[in-house]
Image: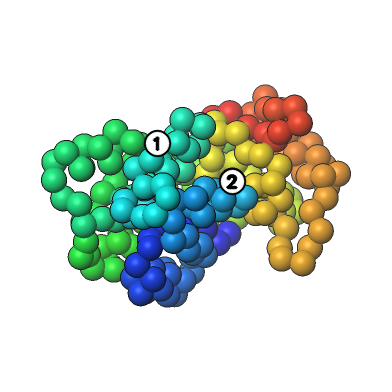
Amino acid sequence: MTQTILLLEDDIQLSDTIKQFLTFQKYEVLCAYDGLQAEDFMYERHIDLLLLDVKVPHLSGFEFLKEIRENGKETPAIFITSLNSVKDVTEGFESGCDDYIRKPFALKELLVRVESLLKRSYGTHEDKIALGDNLIFDTKSLLLTRDNAIVSLKTKELKLLALFLQQSNELLEYENIFETLWDYGEEPSAGSLRTYIKTLRATIGKEKIETVKNIGYRFVK
């Protein structure tokens, strides 16, 4: 499953360079050039990781991250900035970031930090996650097995399970789920989603997937 990175950077040349590099590494990169545009992406799309410059128009990176943290979004975040005082670093972490990289930086270093945070967001540094009842989910191959035998699930059900594990204990709104499961040009189906949820509950345990009425679902770790 392609992971999506939101890049908030108002230097267009640097933004294009980072986007090209991370796209080559098989990530989807959404570019925002000011804090308000980043807000729109954040609430319209499913985002796996945030790369945030601080000094951007309308809403600074610090303000943007603090605001989404107050609204319950725990998406991993890295600040990429020329600010380097102890005060700035402290403010960055107090606003809710997970890492901090100073400009100028090597793209390879950025990649290492991105990959490290994305692995951590699955709650493990392993590719395989134990779900209880002898169930093992491989996050790379999207295979679910029980006692080494493959559990037959549809592709969208496996993508949904991966999304739940990546965002465990977080509220996943319907639109975020639709954005991840249905490809461009496909028509999302609320009825199909309910069927996928029912199948996953029967497979991994009903108590692990909570319904948040009229909003979405939450995977309880």
**Tag 2 secondary structure:** helix
Percent of width and height locating residue 102: 21, 56
Percent of width and height locating residue 62: 34, 42
Q: Which residue is mark 1?
A: 66
Residue 91, numbered circle: none
Q: Is residue 93 above or below residue 111?
A: above
Q: Residues within 10 Å of mark 1 (few under 14, many from 20)?
A: some
Three-letter residue code for mark 1: Lys
State the image quarter where residue 180 is shown.
bottom right
For residue 37, say whether it is visible: yes
Outermost residue on the left side: it is 85
Q: Is residue 158 above or below residue 141?
A: above
Three-letter residue code for mark 2: Tyr
Q: Which residue is mark 2?
A: 43
Q: Residues within 10 Å of mark 2 (few under 14, many from 20)?
A: some
Q: Which is nearer the eye, 159 or 151? A: 159
